[in-house]
Image (spheres, rainbow, N blue to C red):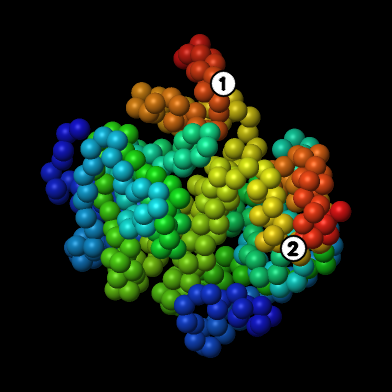
Amino acid sequence: MQKLEQETYWKLLFDFLQRYVPLTEEAFTQWRPYFEIREFGKKRMLVHKGEIEDYVNIIAQGLVRKYMKVKKGDVTLQIAPEGHMVHSERSFHLRQPSDVFIETIEPTIVISISYDNLQALYQNDPLAEKLGRLFATEMFIIKDKRFFDILKKSTREIFLDYMKTHPQMLQRVPQKFIASYLNIKPETFSRLKHLLKKKV
Amino acid sequence: MEKALGNYLVRYPNLTDEELEMIRARMEVRELAKRQLLIQPGEQEEYLNLVAKGVLRKFFYKGREEVITQLAKEGDLISSSVSFFSGQPSQYAIEALEPSTVYAISRTHLEELYAISPKMERLARLVITDLYLSKEKWEQDHIQFDIRQRFVNFVHNNTDLIQRVPQKYIASYLNIKPETFSRLKHLLKKSPLIATLS
């Protein structure tokens, strides 16, 4: 991973936030100290089960996986590339120990805001409240759609839709993680991949 | 109506009587007969509904099968929320299982509230975060717990719904096949709580 200039990360954050709220350059200067840039190697834990999640993270570079460990093995809940947000939501918001692990797949740089800083930002700028509402709404919609898809679509549809919207993932993510995320058995996944090849 | 609204909002940070009144003034009462639909697939959701009385189910059609994703009783919010928040047509239907009363706020009125005060933004942020976290919990419960545990958890947390909602709907909500549901019921008969089922 080629590390970027510090300023480039702040520009990324500014652009990210501007997608939600009309944030001015001046306001962003006020907001910036609330955020921090954090760097992780490959296969590093952002959060361990049992810890209290202290950050909301926006991925600037790299790739991160959220998963649970159960008897039958790991179950992947999220695969987050650049531009996505990742955190142990229930732990972060309810201030309780995390049920999930969040681990990097590649070396990763995230732009993060801590729980305390986020609360302070909400207090200090009403625009942050709006941002928070819009974030929560967007995450809710994404989550609802994911469950809807898993309950409604066929395995083949789920697979093809994901591959269409995330064409680069097969190169970057071990297949078993994607299969787990899509709730598809590994052997079914391999068979579906074969079908995809013919099409391309 | 004030009571149901007050009970719901008391979970959220100290609103003044004035603010509570601003919200109340923008809400409307919707009465539903048993089996009446609040929304159908293809319509656009205009309301967030707070259940004051009754039980409702939210579901979508998978072929001819109805898949239930929510059972809402007094004090719960129910809405085709993705449609409400995104403006896209609803993929869900919502139906009253008993004669029901809901207090509803329209999107327009909600936007008005946001414009009045950042405190309303905050309230909405917290409500939406709760909706989101409950989805997250639903997913984690499905991963963590087997069918039997999910069944037991549900029965223990929803003794009233067990009495009020047809079993096939509860089975669908828990993503359990009806025949498995019957078997679980039988297995757990020893528990007095669950005995009420049979």
Instruction: Name the image quarter holding residue B184.
Output: top right
Helix or strand or loop: what does disc 1 sit on? helix
**Image mark for residue A188:** 1
Question: Residue, x 72% and y 38% (percent of image)?
Answer: B62
Up-down: is B54 above or below A15?
Answer: below
- Residue B145 position within the rendered picture, expressed as x and y whole percent measured from the top left: 60, 45
Q: Chain of mark 1?
A: A
Helix or strand or loop: what does disc 2 sit on? helix
Q: Chain of mark 2?
A: B
- Residue B108 position within the rendered picture, expressed as x and y whole percent measured from the top left: 56, 68
Amino acid at circle 1:
Thr
- Number of other residues with Cα within 10 Å of mark 2, as a class: few under 14, some 14 to 19, many 20 or more: some
**Image mark for residue B56:** none
Pointer 2 and pointer 1: residues touching (CB < 8 Å)? no
Q: Residue furthest front?
A: B190
Amino acid at circle 2:
Thr
Question: Residue, x 32% and y 56% (percent of image)?
Answer: A55
- Residue A120 position within the rendered picture, expressed as x and y whole percent measured from the top left: 30, 70
Q: Left or right: where does residue B80 sit relative to residue A143?
A: right
User: Does the rendering let one see residue A145?
Assistant: no
Residue under label 2: B159
B49 and A77: which is toward the camera = A77
